[in-house]
Image (cartoon, coloured by chain):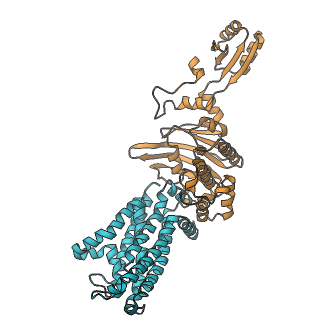
Chain colours: A cyan, B orange
Amino acid sequence: MNATAVLHSEWIKLKSLRGTAGSLLAVLLVTVGITALAFATIGRSEADNAGAEPVYDAFYALNFGQIAAITFGATAVSSEYVGGALRVSLAAVPRRGLLYAAKAAVVGALALVVGVATSFTAFLVGQSFLGPYAIGLDRPGAVRACLGAGIYLALMALLAAGLTTVLRSGVAVLSILIPFILIVSFVVGDVAGGAADFLPDRAGQQILHEHPAGTLGAWSGLAVCAAWAAAALLAGWWSLRRRDA
Amino acid sequence: MTRIDVHELTKEYGGTRAVDRLSFTVEPGRVTGFLGPNGAGKSTTMRLVLGLDRPTSGTATVGGRAYASLDQPLRRVGALLDPQAAHGSRTARNHLRALAASNRIAATRVEAVLDEAGLSAVAGRRVRTYSLGMRQRLGIAAALLGDPEVLMLDEPSNGLDPEGIIWIRELMRRLAREGRTVLVSSHLMNETASFADHLVVLGRGRLLADTPMREFIDTQVRPRVRIRTTDDAALGALLDGHGHRAVRDADSGRWTVTDARVADIGKLTARAGVPILELAAEEGTLEEAYLALTADATEYTARPARTTTGQEASR
């Protein structure tokens, strides 16, 4: 089996699914759209606050964009668990590791490209509304935060893709991950202190800070997030390999 | 060689054996009908051959190799398992293009099989808008994509309209004539009888028969002769005198001679000078043969037992 051919096949599969392609586009549209809305309305007054943190605040809309990234990763995989789709895929590519790696690579690469484009665009769009409060990419930590946010979005998509392979259901994964990210991590984070810093979203978002506080630094936080994604992908691989299709 | 070899194949799910030490070979150049009641293990066997499920023990190979070890398997084996396999929000063309790309099959083949399956006009429509028959045609198109030497079709005529059923029958006959190996599961007896040369019959995961179709029918159902005369008394005496078991149907006036052939009965009546109005062979049908064989192996037999055919009832 030829890896390029399988990658090509997975690319055709992804782009021909309206919902999956749509959720990838939504990462960009939602993040930039909400950034524009928020910064055009309350951007300057927020930036004037004593606690304002201009680099971190620039990625306010990432909270919404990451939901689209999770949806993208989950639906890209869950489409294989509708009907007997996986059987057809495995009959075409019986080497399960190759099929899985190709899918993860296409999901990760697309999410990374769109993620980085999203973070830079959102940053620049947001700042364009701030007038005297605006910061540029030359601000310390700004480029790092933009790159990190893009990588973070790709990691969340891969986390969702791995979990969907384990659970074989996009709905199950979305109904676990989205509440987790919106509520659990948020609430538990303030209660549990140190340990919560190692949750995937909290660790990964350390890189958005100009001066990350807490146990994890910018890159080490992102590495913890990547470890979560890798663990989910490995669990998915293990599950795909040992189960009957 | 492009044979499908199943050797001592066993698959257990939990405690139940779906396939039980099954061994058979599917040869090229003929259509092999794969028969058995629901739950007999036909689909499981096909999944095991395709490496989708892992056997508990035993082996299944195509051309001597495990399916999973084939390079570009779609060029060797085409399979139809489930008409719902194509994702509803993809178009038929994109579904086939993704499959073709993975095995480096030229894009022209996509258009060729769409045309073959009669889907060219609707290839740009989302599969969700397709009827079951159209999905079935798409599944068959996918099986043909790599121009494979081996085809495995699970219930291919499911959902097809009469025209589609004729199409799939002619297609399978042609593929076999071209020297390909064709394994087709079905629960429709008349359908299977119309295309199969050879039969592999399963019951409760075990092999019940692996024989040419004609031979299968002849061993399971004894042939009968239907005969009508103007002189019932003479005919009755003649048949009785030669040890034939015959019954006369009072309404139609027809005699049915069991376990006999027209050649013998025809000569007999001619020699005796009994006037004959009608003389016909009643060959056993695949359905009768199948029911005779699987009566014991049927897992979900309705009670009271299956309806017997008219001829059997009159005996």
Query: Is B120 left, or right, of B34 in this rendering?
Result: right
Q: Specify whether residue A144 is in view.
A: yes
Q: Is residue A49 left or right of residue A3?
A: left
Q: How many labels, in total? A: 0
Quick one: quadrant of the C terminus of chain B? top right
Picture residue at 66% right of the left edge, 64% below the top: B107
Q: Position of residue A88 (x, y in %)?
A: 54, 56
Above or below, A229 against A126 in this view is above
Residue A102 visible within the image: no
Q: Position of residue A31 (x, y in %)?
A: 43, 76
Q: Is residue A225 above or below residue B190?
A: below
Q: Residue at x 46, y 80 (%)?
A: A116
> B31 or B278: nearer the eye?
B278
Measured as percent of width and height from the top left, residue A33 is found at 44, 77
Q: Work out whether residue B200 or residue A236 is closer to the camera in this orientation and state it.
A: A236
Q: Nearer the viewer, residue A237 or B210?
A: A237
Where, by quadrant of the figure, is residue B74 drawn?
A: bottom right
Q: Is residue A73 above or below residue B281?
A: below
Residue A114 in percent (x, y) is at 48, 77
Instruction: Give me the residue at 48% from left, 56% from top.
Output: A82
Which residue is located at x 76 percent, y 16 percent? B267
Given residues A100 and B199, the one toward you in this image is A100
